[in-house]
Amino acid sequence: MTAARKTSPLAAFLKAVVSAFSGSPARDVPTVAVGADAGASPGQRGDTATREVTPPAAGSFRVTYAPDRDGDPDAGEIVWTWVPYEENDGRGKDRPVLVIGRQNAERVYAVRLTSKSHDGDRDFLSIGSGEWDSQGRESWVDIEQVYSIHTRGMRREAAVLDLTRFARVAQALQARYGWSAGA
């Protein structure tokens, strides 16, 4: 159940000020979450929560590459969302994930990124650095854990992973899960 959103007293005041000075009604007044979702990051709670999922069966999923910087998470894009910790005890953190394909109309599959070095670890693949990390650190894709990301559960699009690096990730996922890859 998603908490209702209502205009805060500050937002109402700002709307009145903008309206008074501009002579027209103010638009795009900020809202605040109330109730259980107050202070929650996108993807953290409710129907739009990011969830670790059992990877689709071999042959039942196709890794695709279709980036489109349109504000929605698309295959081939690195987006930021709240990701639960492995213990699945309600804790987690905001982190980048690589979208690898569509699950359904409202959700995509993704694998998480980390800047912690995993040289020699078969469950991690280095993809180098990119604009998704403001510190320019090398990133590693965790191919062992697959996540379901709601289209409204991402905080922001960070970057498009180039096709060469994405193809390396797709190849690793094919080898591990038996998925196909392509448009």
Image (cartoon, grey):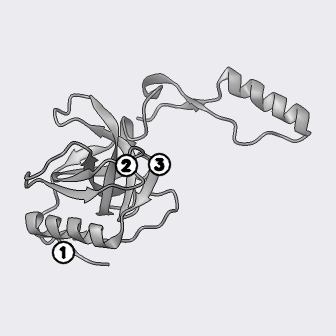
Q: Residues within 10 Å of mark 3 (few under 14, many from 20)?
A: some
Reading the image, the residue beneath label 1 is 180
Question: Could you tell me which residue is drawn at 82 percent across and 29 percent down?
Answer: 16
Q: Residue 139: give x, y in percent of width and height.
A: 27, 51
Look at mark 2 in the image and give the residue it sits on.
Answer: 136
Query: Do tag 3 and tag 1 residues touch (Cβ < 8 Å)?
Result: no
Give coordinates of residue 161: x percent, y percent: 36, 63
Outermost residue toward the bottom? 183
**Which tag is nearer the camera, tag 2 or tag 3?**
2
Residue that appears at 61% across and 32% down: 31
Of badges 1 and 2, the one in the foreground is 2
Left/right placement of residue 71 relative to residue 28 reads: left
- Which residue is disc 3 drawn over? 156
Locate residue 40, reporting x and y percent.
Answer: 43, 30
How far is disc 2 from disc 3 in space, using C-alphas?
Answer: 18 Å
Which sits earlier in the primary sequence, circle 1 or circle 2?
2
Q: Amino acid at mark 2?
A: Gly
The residue at 47%/48% (across/down) is 156
Answer whether labels 1 and 2 touch (C-beta < 8 Å): no
145 over 49 or under it: above or below? below
Q: Can residue 73 be seen by looking at this rendering? A: no
Relative to 120, 162 lies left or right: right
Which of pointers 3 and 1 lies earlier in the amino acid sequence? 3
| Between 25 and 118, the one nearer to me in the picture | 118
Left or right of 18: which side holds 165?
Answer: left
The quadrant in which residue 90 appears is top left
Callout count:
3
Q: Residues within 10 Å of mark 1 (few under 14, many from 20)?
A: some
Residue type for callout 1:
Ser
Q: Secondary structure at mark 2?
A: loop
